[in-house]
């Protein structure tokens, strides 16, 4: 719509609102001018009011928008700070956790090493004689069965040598039990030195009696080894507190060569019979027992 028409309409409306006799007396020309002037004036006023209202409305809206943006920025900044703080806390917790894990792992490794050492010590005590350091009777029972089975499987000979100190009771009676213990240690040392192969094993069977398991050893080999040990000890005196104590040993040997119905017990029994025969014949000698089918 054209501005002139808007002004006229607005002016006529104004005249109706401000109706007076004076306005009724006006001519058409003056009326049209007055209406136009008043319409233009009122239109300007209304336009200004609308502009002010719109400007105020959009200003408030803009301020709200700025406030929202500011709040959003503040919230974003707070969120970033919170995220950074959370990330740092998580990193600190992770570092602390890793440090504790490393500490616990180290403690666990130390505990496992200590446990392994304790198990090895316990195993050593279970198979070794505390006084002489040789294997004990318990280990003999396990080893003779294993070597017997190996002998049967490989069809190889298996020899036993029993060793007993002659008149050992006199050592304890004349010089005391401490001298007797030192005598056993002395003999065990010479027995260890007499073993030439890693497969040969020495045991303290009980008291002053010792036993050798000699895998893959013939009758002559077992007899020779026992005799060499006996002759060596016969030439050396046991010394206790600067006192020379002459000692001799008696030996009995037995060799398993795949005889029928012969087991570890029969092999040991044969060596024990040979040892008894050596003592019965005057001691300080070696006798052998031959297994028969």
Image: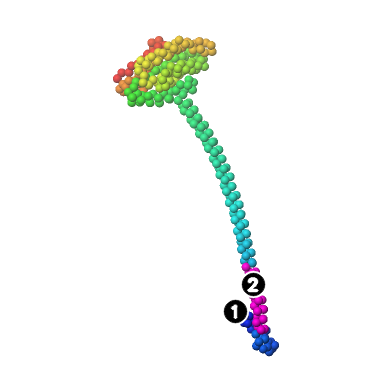
Q: Which residue position holds label 2?
A: 51
Residue that appears at 47% across and 22% down: 129
Give the left or right position of residue 267, taking residue 208 as reference: left
Is residue 285 on the magenta stretch? Answer: no
- Residue 256, given in percent of the width and then of the height, sits at 34, 20
- Location of the C terminus by quadrant is top left
Q: Which residue position holds label 1?
A: 2
Residue that appears at 47% across and 11% down: 236
> Which of the two marks, 1 or 2, is nearer to us in this view?
1
Residue 248 is at least partly visible in this image: no
Q: Secondary structure at mark 1?
A: loop
Of residues 262 and 188, the one nearer the viewer is 188
In this rendering, the answer to whether 104 lies above or below 37 is above
- Residue 115, given in percent of the width and then of the height, sits at 50, 32
Residue range of the region highlighted in magenta in the rendering: 33-58
Residue 148: numbered disc: none
Residue that appears at 53% across and 11% down: 242
Of residues 135 and 198, the one nearer the viewer is 198
Q: Residues within 10 Å of mark 2 (few under 14, many from 20)?
A: few
Q: Residues within 10 Å of mark 1 (few under 14, many from 20)?
A: few
Task: State the count of labels.
Answer: 2
Of residues 213 and 39, the one nearer the viewer is 39
Is residue 40 on the magenta stretch? Answer: yes
Quadrant in which residue 12 is drawn: bottom right
- Residue 112, given in percent of the width and then of the height, sits at 50, 34
Residue 224 is at least partly visible in this image: yes
Quadrant in which residue 5 is drawn: bottom right
């Amino acid at each position: 719509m054209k501005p002139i028409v808007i002004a006229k309409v607005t002016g006529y409306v104004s005249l109706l609102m401000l109706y007076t006799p004076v306005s009724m007396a006006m001519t058409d020309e003056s009326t049209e001018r007055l209406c136009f002037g008043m319409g233009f004036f009122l239109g300007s006023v209304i336009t200004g009011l609308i502009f002010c209202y719109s400007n105020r409305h959009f200003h408030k809206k803009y301020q709200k928008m700025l406030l929202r943006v500011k709040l959003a920025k503040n919230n974003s900044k707070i969120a970033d700070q919170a995220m950074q703080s959370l990330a740092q806390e998580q990193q600190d917790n992770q570092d602390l956790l890793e440090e504790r894990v490393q500490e616990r792992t180290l403690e666990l490794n130390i505990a496992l090493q200590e446990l392994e050492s304790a198990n090895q010590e316990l195993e050593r005590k279970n198979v070794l004689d505390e006084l002489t350091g040789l294997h004990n009777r318990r280990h003999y029972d396990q080893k003779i069965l294993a070597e017997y089975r190996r002998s049967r499987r490989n069809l190889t000979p298996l020899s036993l040598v029993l060793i007993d100190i002659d008149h050992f009771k006199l050592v304890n009676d004349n010089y005391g039990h401490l001298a007797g213990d030192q005598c056993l240690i002395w003999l065990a040392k010479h027995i260890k030195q007499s073993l030439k192969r890693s497969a040969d094993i020495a045991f303290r069977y009980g008291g002053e009696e010792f036993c050798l398991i000699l895998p893959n050893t013939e009758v002559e080999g077992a007899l020779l080894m026992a005799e060499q040990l006996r002759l060596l000890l016969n030439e050396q005196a046991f010394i206790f507190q600067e006192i020379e104590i002459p000692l001799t040993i008696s030996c009995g040997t037995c060799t398993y060569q795949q005889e029928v119905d012969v087991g570890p017990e029969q092999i040991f029994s044969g060596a024990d019979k040979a040892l008894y025969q050596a003592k019965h014949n005057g001691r300080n000698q070696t006798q052998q027992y031959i297994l028969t089918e």
